Image: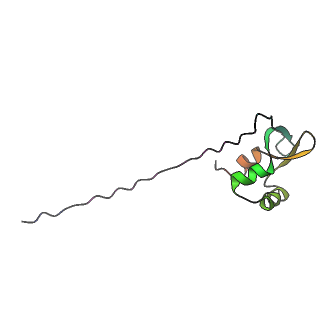
Amino acid sequence: MKEKMMYRTRQITIEMHSITIIRTGGRQNSAHCECCGETVTAFAPEQIAAVLRLDLTEICHRIETQQIHLTSVGDNVAKICGNSFKNNGFFGK
């Protein structure tokens, strides 16, 4: 007599997270963001473009549409508010 074989299937879900660390070479990059109303970590537009894998044109567009906050650090150097990424869901929640 033949035995009937039973097969089981299993569904495996894998959830992955990533952490991005931007090193600033020991320089302090804090600035006051007028949109957030607080002192925030500020990043160069080139750093943000590299992390988000976007070109600078897209970064500028997001600044113009106020998706990203622009601030300045000393000597009127343009920097981008780090809080604007958390608040707009660029890196997840």
39 left or right of 74 in image: left
Which of the pair 19/69 is nearer the observer?
19
Please name the residue shown 53% across and 49% down the image: 16
Please say if 58 is above or below 71: below
Residue furthest front as drawn = 25
Residue 26: image quadrant is top right
Q: Position of residue 57 (x, y in %)?
A: 80, 61
Residue 34: image quadrant is top right
Please say if 31 is above or below 13: above
Which quadrant is the N terminus positioned in?
A: bottom left
Residue furthest left as drawn = 1
Please say if 22 is above or below 46: above
Q: How many marks?
A: 0
Please name the residue shown 88% across and 44% down the image: 72
Residue furthest right as drawn = 75
Which of the pair 29/27 is nearer the observer?
27
Please name the residue shown 84% across and 38% down the image: 31
Q: Position of residue 28 (x, y in %)?
A: 80, 34
Question: Does the magenta-highlighted stretch encompass residue 67?
Answer: no
Q: What are the residue bounds of the magenta stretch?
A: 7-24
Q: Position of residue 65 (x, y in %)?
A: 82, 59
14 left or right of 69 in image: left
Q: Label the magenta part by its dominant secondary structure.
A: loop
Q: Position of residue 70 (x, y in %)?
A: 85, 49
